[in-house]
Image (cartoon, helix red, strand yellow):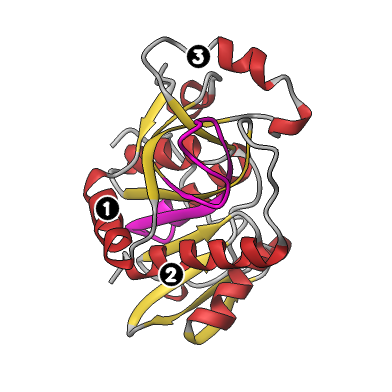
């Protein structure tokens, strides 16, 4: 393991519950209200175990499998706080991020699912975290294989590939300028803002991590999902993540 040295006797600052309240497996949307939605609509016997800073975490059961659903917030700094605390203080074994992204490939249509095999980030997150000068972080291949098997069984169309973890929201930055700087040989299929941090931290702890995304916009399409389309697609993503932990 290559984790940062942490002050002795330090307790989690952002997750306020006993260790036993968090399951070994965590499903992690960005939006804490989506965590609430999952708990209320997909879990049984779900209990609110954290509401510090309104970052809701619920622990309950999905088909008799104990699981926690918790928001990560937006961006790598927020993801890094919660992922680190979950792995370090609560000894979580697996985190599956679920969220939305923009498509960077003409093959990935709005409304379709993506599975991030790895994540590219051009910044200094890894170096700041533990001194590793890397810009590509891998997800867990065994976990990805299971997700793909479940997706095929459900007949969900899903794309595997590399995503870019941005440090700004796509629509509020010069995306084309950023894409021109991507090294040759890295073929991106989507852009989001959290997965690199999750993968890098998970790898430092030698734990499992995956990221399932729904494309909600595309640089190749002038298409925006309706409320109903978005709900259906997000529900598919949620059930895919949950069935992959069984």
- In depth, the one of 191 and 80 nearer the eye is 191
Picture quadrant where residue 137 is located:
top left
On residue 239, the disc is 2
Cα–Cα gap, marks 1 and 3: 27 Å
Mark 1, Cα crowd under 10 Å, few <14 / some 14-19 / many 20+, is: some
The stretch of residues the image draws in magenta is: 86-114
Q: Position of residue 186 (x, y in %)?
A: 40, 19
| Residue 106, magenta (yes or no) | yes
Query: Which class describes the residues within 10 Å of circle 2: few (<14), some (14-19), or many (20+)?
Result: some
Residue at the spot 34% in from the left edge and 41% down from the top edge: 139
Asked if labels 3 and 1 touch by Cβ distance under 8 angstroms, the answer is no
In the rendered view, would you say 124 is above or below 198? above
The mark closer to the camera, 1 or 2, is 2
Depth check, front residue: 150 or 21:
150
User: Which numbered dot is residue 143?
Assistant: 1
Q: Position of residue 126 (x, y in %)?
A: 46, 26
Q: CA distance from mark 2 to mark 3?
A: 33 Å
Residue 10 visible in the picture:
no
Q: Is residue 65 left or right of residue 114?
A: left
Residue 105 inside the magenta-drawn segment: yes
User: Which element is circle 2 on?
Assistant: helix
Left or right: residue 112 versus residue 95 is right
Query: Where does label 3 land, which residue?
Result: 182
Position of 174 with respect to 56 (left or right) is right
């Amino acid at each position: 393991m290559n984790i940062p040295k942490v002050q002795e006797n330090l307790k989690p600052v952002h997750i306020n519950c006993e260790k036993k309240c968090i399951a070994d497996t965590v499903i992690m949307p960005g939006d804490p209200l989506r965590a609430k939605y999952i708990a209320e609509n997909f879990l049984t016997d779900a209990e609110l175990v954290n509401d510090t800073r309104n970052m809701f975490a619920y622990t309950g059961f999905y088909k008799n499998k104990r699981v926690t659903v918790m928001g990560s917030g937006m961006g790598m700094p927020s993801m890094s706080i919660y992922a680190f605390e979950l792995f370090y203080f609560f000894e979580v074994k697996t985190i599956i991020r679920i969220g939305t992204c923009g498509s960077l490939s003409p093959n990935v249509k709005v409304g379709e699912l993506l599975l991030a095999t790895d994540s590219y980030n051009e910044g200094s997150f890894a170096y700041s975290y533990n001194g590793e000068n890397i810009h590509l972080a891998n997800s867990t291949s065994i976990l990805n294989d299971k997700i793909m098997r479940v997706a095929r069984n459900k007949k969900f169309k899903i794309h595997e590939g590399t995503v870019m973890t941005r440090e700004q929201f796509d629509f509020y930055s010069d995306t084309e300028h950023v894409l021109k700087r991507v090294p040759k040989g890295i073929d991106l299929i989507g852009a989001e803002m959290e997965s690199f941090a999750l993968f890098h931290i998970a790898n430092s702890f030698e734990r499992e991590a995956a990221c399932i995304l729904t494309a909600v916009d595309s640089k190749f399409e002038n298409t925006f999902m309706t409320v109903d389309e978005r709900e259906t697609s997000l529900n598919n993503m949620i059930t895919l993540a949950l069935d992959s932990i069984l």
